[in-house]
Amino acid sequence: MKTQLDNINIGFMRNSLYSFKQYNNIPKNTADLDHFVLELWNDEVFRESIFLASYELYNEWARLCQNDPSLSLVKRNKINNSILKYYIRITTRSTPFGTFASHSAFELNSENKNIEAGNMNAIHRYTTLDLSFLFQVITLINRDFPEVHEYELNDSIYKLGDYYRYIETTIQNEKRVYTLSSLEKDELLDFLVDTIADQSYSFDSLVALVAENVEGVSEEDAKYYIFSLIDAQFFKSGFDICLNEHSPLYQIIQYLSSKKGIHPELDTYLETLIKMDGYMELLNSGIGQAQEYYNEIFALANQFSILYDRKYLINSSLKRNLDFSPVTREDLSKIKKGINTLTCFWDKGSETVNENLEKFKSAFYTRYEESLVPLVEVLDNESGIGYIQEQNNENDFSSLLDTLSWPNSNNDSFSITYNKKIHEFWRRLINKANINGDTAIDLSQHDIDSLQNTEEVSLARSLSVMIEKVSDKIAISSVGGTSGTNLIARFSNEDEEILAPMNRIIKEEQNDDHFIYAELLHLPDNRVGNILLRQVKRGNQLSFLTKPSASENTIALTDLYIKMIDKRVVLFHKGLNKEVKIFHSTAHNFDYNSLPVYQFLCDLQHQDVSSALVLNIGDTNYLMYDYIPRITYGEDIIFTPALWRLYQNEVSGVKTKNNTESIKTIKEYLSDKKVNRYFFISQGDNKLLIDAENENLLLFLVDELRSKEMVTLTECLYDLKTDEFNNEIVIPMINRNYKAFKTELDHHLFNINISDNKFIPGNKWLYYKIYCGNKFSDKILQDVFPDLLPQLSEEELIKKWFYIRYSDPDNHIRLRLEINDSKLTNTAQIITTFNDYFDKYISEGIINKVEMGTYDREYERYEGEFIDAAEHIFHYDSKLTVNLLKNIPNNDDLWLYTIKSIDTYFNVFNLDLDKRYEVINKLYTQFQREFNVDSNLKKQLDLKYRNNLNIISEIVETDNSPYFSEFVSSIKENCREIENLKTIQKERLVSSFIHMHINRLIRSRHRMHELIIYGIVEKYYKMKIGKRKYLVS
């Protein structure tokens, strides 16, 4: 399926600070490296970059340049190699890292220029203080001056039973540690929570609240009480940093300025921070700055008497001002052509599955089924199901276990997917290229349209296309992401030029009033905050354990509810009765050591979005071949550079030979492998450019092969004789094919108390799970139910009963019995009667086991107050299906009677022919998507319909079986609520009842049966509509 992507006429480029031409300055002989490293000290720009990147290495380098006699030869070589690696980075890597790389924004136009070295004066610098340091300053001031701040309730507070639960934050070894805490509810806490709500109160106002509303409490007692709640973090200070506002240092200076004159020590802190800001402005005047400014900043930082690491204190980034567009309209056409080529190889089966989210869905459905549940209740590890299912037990602290450091559990196994058509296509091409000695595979010379998947790639509404511009060629790295803002938002905090295009992306993303769109703000760790700073304004924010933006509406975590609908987790806002879409506009890797709420909300972004669209050559092909040629489309579009795998055991003596001999061996090995002169040592995102004719650089490859059994090399696409820069270009695009999943929800469902719809055995209901095989389940339904259940009804022990078939994963029948109100004390008699009927089947092994469970009414699924009528319908439907199972002589014909049942349900709900077709067509469409229905299956289904049309028409239109007439009359007599339902409610309910009926009647592979049955009924109703039109005409 072809994509329809539009760009927004803007692009962003990241460059190495130096060009490839400067990379070629690296001496080729090891004897010349000492002099080269010493000469680099005179490069003020590079020297400052090292100072910012590694304060320790900078000092060691200084000792080397001063010819410190205490430095051993081994130490000197180690310093040389470290400096050399950083020099390679500044000349060949565009990934943001201090002053080693720069970013730029540009407008797309028709001008065509290569990305060549420019004037260093065209570079603008942004310098900030490390967030870890600033948060320590905030902690210090909050601790020492608690009475000057305003306070709010901890935004993680929620009620659970007799307790308020919330999350406390502590700092251990400069890391944030989050702990779930509880305070027992009492009248005063309830009063404070209700009074404060989402407001801010000064310390004195909080004290007054307590002193004025609690009898016999002095002001001192009230102060002590408020202090204790602040210390317990039940109240949080308003003095904090917002991740979604302008410069953090500016925020702190503004806040302390508002408190000026309150305390002389606070004024001193303010003056110190203003001075630090002034020195950073001096740093921003250019690059290659002298160390004196840094020393002044360090001296000022020392005045706070807090621990900090010099190498992290000062962060700098660079913006290169472009006067041209590196991407032309012609380039855009190439990019779109390339993306459509990538979709030919996209395979849904090869998509990366978010196992955490899938396991959570399974656990949620097992516990809550289709209930609408508060998010905080679900994610509570004790009362709910938590998020990461494997970690639920690990959240219980043990003084015996948790003071120990445990080894990592290494798991060397991983899963691969195999698409025969794609794998064989690539295997043929790669084998042919290797036999012929081809250096590239050109996809324009092959039929790739035949590989095109009929299913559409599920790209997000906005996304990022990452490319490299290599002379006049386009190398496409990846396509995708949950938002086109993710890769650029981190620069918006300091570079206001990025705000306008980012707001255009946000406007495109938020074009549907069905949803509430909210930006997620959370600080997993102090230093991580440096990459989470941004200015992304969506109108709404979900701020969790961090300060919200004053300009945005804040959504409370306690207002969010979740529900499973069509195998999706759907997030709803209680007050606004709308579905909520969460965005986390960052490139943060949130999978490691994150709070459950944060990781869940971040994962939820990916639920309906394909993982990055990259060239899929098949998992086994990628693992099997030690050489894969460059893959292109024509001469101008590159998908992947050439790849080589080198093996330690193939390089004779690499671990034992000296460096000179090893270099000689490596050169011969690379020549045999036909590796290009310039290549990258590649490990994940880390790349090191090597020149095979440079001994100093080849030693890095030698070291890799000495320490690793296998090393991966990738081709360098650039011409290193030019003055080009390594570049990564991000082009945000809008996906015009995007269709959001939408879910409607009735507002009254938010007011349901789940516990009112849970029934433990004997409390109004008995709920049995009868485990047996599929065929034996039919025997139970045919031989036991027709006798047991009428007996219990005649003895007035039960009012009604119903069943469904289920697997969890073992097959079983779920039987629910509503106990007669006047016979609640006779539960034991029901159990005894039940046992009398089933003992025989258990002893014969027909039934594996019988369990009792808690009956959770599906209140939400059945329109709330309609649940009583729904349970009556379940009862009459169960009687109908048991009669059909017992009396239809050929079980293979049962599917025909489901069609009669479907039509009967439409009669009961008084839906006309057009509505019947609409409902069935919608169900059929959903199931086609689920089973990836192709033209071949559609042809077979059409044939089955035609072959059975006569008997279908006979059963539906003339069969007057008493089972169906009793079913209809019972519902009309006892379920008059149907008449008061709106049409949309009828459609939802009838779909559910039909689904449950098929589940009861058909003993296995229910969803497959549903697909075919809905397909046949859809054709049947379509035929009837056609006939009606013919008769009318």
Image (cartoon, rainbow, N blue to C red):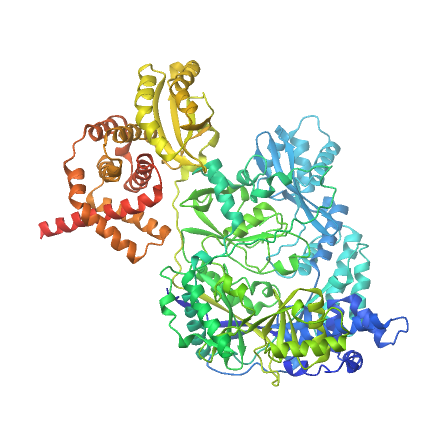
Q: Residue furthest right?
A: 69
Question: x and y percent of residue 726 in the render?
Answer: 60, 76
Q: In the visual, does 673 lie left or right of 804?
A: right
Q: Can residue 267 be seen in this view?
A: yes
| Identity of the residue drawn at 63% across and 32% down | 189
Question: x and y percent of residue 251 in the render?
Answer: 66, 58
Looking at this view, is 866 or 765 the one in front?
765
Q: Split into 4 quadrants, where in the image is the N terminus?
A: bottom left
Looking at this view, is 357 or 209 the one in front?
357
Q: Residue furthest bottom?
A: 721
Question: x and y percent of residue 320 in the render?
Answer: 61, 76
Q: In the figure, residue 40 lies in which quadrant? A: bottom right
Looking at this view, is 275 or 970 the one in front?
970
| Identity of the residue drawn at 38% across and 45% down | 744
Question: x and y percent of residue 324 in the render?
Answer: 53, 81
Q: Can residue 108 be seen in this view?
A: no
